[in-house]
Amino acid sequence: MKEKLHYIHLVLLIYLIQSGVALFTLPNVLAYDFGTNGWIAVLLVSLLVSLNILLIGGVYKLGNGKSLFIILENGLPRLLLYPVYIFLILLWSLLACIVGKQYINLYQIICFHTTPVAILKLTYDVLVYLLLIKGLYNIAKASTIIFSITIFLALLFTTQFHGIELARFTPFLFKEGNDWLHGMIDTYIAFLGFELSLLFIPYINKESRFIKAMLVGNLITTFIYTYTCFVIFGYFGHAYLRELLFPLMNLLSTIHFPFLERLENLLYGLFLFKVLITSVMYYWAATEAAKRIFKRTDEKLLSFLIIAITYFISLVPGTLDQISEWLSFLSKIEITIAIGLPAAAILLLMIQKGGKKYSDVQKR
């Protein structure tokens, strides 16, 4: 019997999948698109994400713990099913790949100026593969350790409270913003990762408290995002934030301890663990979809091939601007998957239940 995911594992896994490099640019997005007090938009978008999570919870309740893939296979013809699986494999593996590439490019700029990005990315992918082949339960246990390592980053911001000025918040809400809709989409992208919980259903039981765990995980992400953006808005002000591409990096560079120099390099290095979990989980999702097509192929081999192929694809976008364009495009597609996939699963379940009731009536 397979071990089931514990409640706390689910909570921390959801948080770690969601949070990552997006936090480095989020304050800039909020200041540019929402304007004054843009940090409040995080709370509004979090409510939308919570509704999306409840939609996923609906799949769990209606399906009585049935796997998403079984729901799709019972409701769709094979001619349509395989293209859907191939699309999901491509999308999830590319997201895993480009998320890692964005982090590696930034890290190379900060710490390893002379080391080729291709070498750093290869090293990163080896780490991803070694964790991926351990399976979901061990990944979840690793997430607990990673959470305990990285959560203290939020505590470091308390050292910068002296630089916060209330006047920088202004009494106005969402003034001087450029595009609310664009801002809502980009902020929603920062929360992505929760949708992979659709694939957790076969790995949970009643003690996992699936829906509550997802909501609490999202609540932790919301708190970290809101708290961080609040501090950054108070420290820099919305007007200056519009000019900073990576405000969090700028804030980290202001943190100093007498016994340690270039602390921001160490702090940014700790984000590796959070980004690693995000990449691993998207690769895990891609592997799960691939297993439905290549049923006789070894799971570790599938994971290796997916990571290897996407590694070479990751060499195509070279600059940070190109990587951001790729990631934005893929993430917008993923938003439609996050909403559309559970909605489609619920529709298929309702059709299947309706057909079963009709069949029972006919038998009588």
Image (spheres, helix red, strand yellow):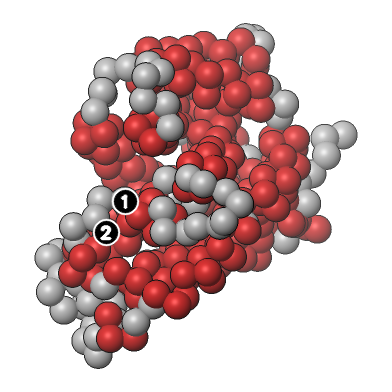
- Relative depth, front residue between 162 and 154: 162
Q: Residue at x 27, y 18 (%)?
A: 316
Question: In whole angstroms, how far apart are the C-alphas of marks 2 and 1?
Answer: 7 Å
Amino acid type, callout 2:
Asn
Furthest-bottom residue in this view = 171
**Residue 235 horizontal/vertical position (percent):** 35, 71
Residue 189 in view, yes or no: yes
Amino acid type, callout 1:
Phe
Q: Residue at x 16, y 79 (%)?
A: 175
Q: Please report contact status of discs 2 and 1: CB closer than 8 Å, yes or no.
A: yes
Relative to residue 13, is residue 124 drawn left or right?
Answer: left
Q: Name the residue carrying label 1.
A: 246
Q: Name the residue carrying label 2.
A: 28
**Residue 103 horizontal/vertical position (percent):** 41, 35
Q: Quadrant of the N terminus?
A: top right
**Residue 217 horizontal/vertical position (percent):** 60, 60
Quarter of the image for residue 99 reads top left
